[in-house]
Amino acid sequence: MEMVWQPALVAGQVPQPAVSADDAALMARYRDGDGHAFETLYRRHRAPLYRFIARQLREPGAADEVFQEVWMAVVKGRERYQPTARFVTFLFSIAHRRIADRARKAIRRAEAPMPDDAPDAGLSPAHLAESAALGAALAAALNTLAPEQRTAFLLRAEGELTVEEIAAVTGVPFETAKSRLKYANRALREKLIAWK
Amino acid sequence: MTLDFDDWELVRAWRAVAREVPGVWLDCRVLGYAFRAARRRLGDAQ
């Protein structure tokens, strides 16, 4: 009888033994055939990775496609994965390359509005309205940044990457990555001065 | 809501408002693909 696949994420359960394992150990377990180890990794990184991609690709459906491609690349590359860098650096590097490939191929990107943020049931209506307004302001400010600055900020904010890791992911010297992050933060501060 | 925008406060502000997540169907596609690959790996090992 074929085993029924029921990922814990979809079933609303949490595979407890894998929760505290580090990413490299989870990848090793997945390489050896443990699907739940992958699921733990996926659950840990799916949202930041998705936002990193979605905030840089404006074509409808593009974020979903690239997100899927990135994880499939992780699956296909599991045998070759070497934990010489943090898994998150490996993951965001793949995403960065896929986004860059797509940007190179795109003749012109439509200025489509970003999807609305999902409401958070735990916040009051007033807080939600304020939060939504700040979210819209931040998203708009982010869209005005040069692409390399936006990437640097998102790698920091979503991937929690260090400047060294941002440099490695984007293939630039440390000082360049540091400068991009600095200019991104300065530009965002200026755009958001009304919130100060 | 007022913010003092040092670098980390920008990051914290972003995390407080950025809530996009992949849809369930996308989760299912990725996890289904990954689990099938894992099953093939286990099948190969036996």
Image: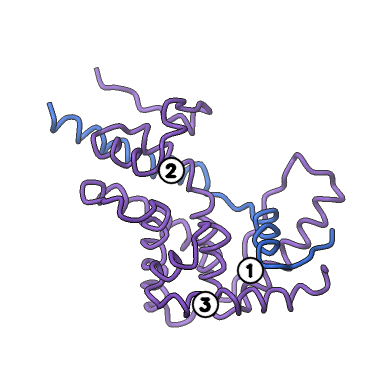
Chain colours: A purple, B blue
Q: Earlier in the sequence, mark 3 or mark 2?
A: 2
Give the chain letter at badge 2.
A
- Residue mark closest to the camera, 3 vs 1: 3
Give the chain letter at badge 1.
A
Q: Would you say the residues marked 3 and 2 are in contact, meaning their CB atoms lie under 8 Å apart?
A: no
Please state which amino acid type lies under the numbered disc 1: Pro
Q: Disc 3 on helix, strand or loop?
A: helix
Neighbour class for label 3 at 10 Å: few (<14), some, many (≥20)?
some
Q: Dot 2 corresponds to which residue?
A: A42
Of residue B9 and residue B44, the one placed in the foreground of this image is B9
Q: Which mark is residue A147?
A: 3
- Residue mark closest to the camera, 2 vs 1: 2
The total number of labels drawn is 3
Please state which amino acid type lies under the numbered disc 3: Pro
Q: Disc 2 on helix, strand or loop?
A: helix
Which x, y percent locates residue A104? 38, 79
Residue at position x 67%, y 50% from top?
Answer: A118
Give the chain letter at badge 3.
A
Q: Dot 1 corresponds to which residue?
A: A113
Q: Disc 1 on helix, strand or loop?
A: loop
Please state which amino acid type lies under the numbered disc 2: Tyr
Residue at position x 30%, y 54% from top?
Answer: A84
Disc 2 from disc 1: Cα separation: 27 Å
Residue at position x 46%, y 25% from top?
Answer: A16
Residue at position x 41%, y 35% from top?
Answer: A21
Of residue A112 and residue A34, the one placed in the foreground of this image is A34
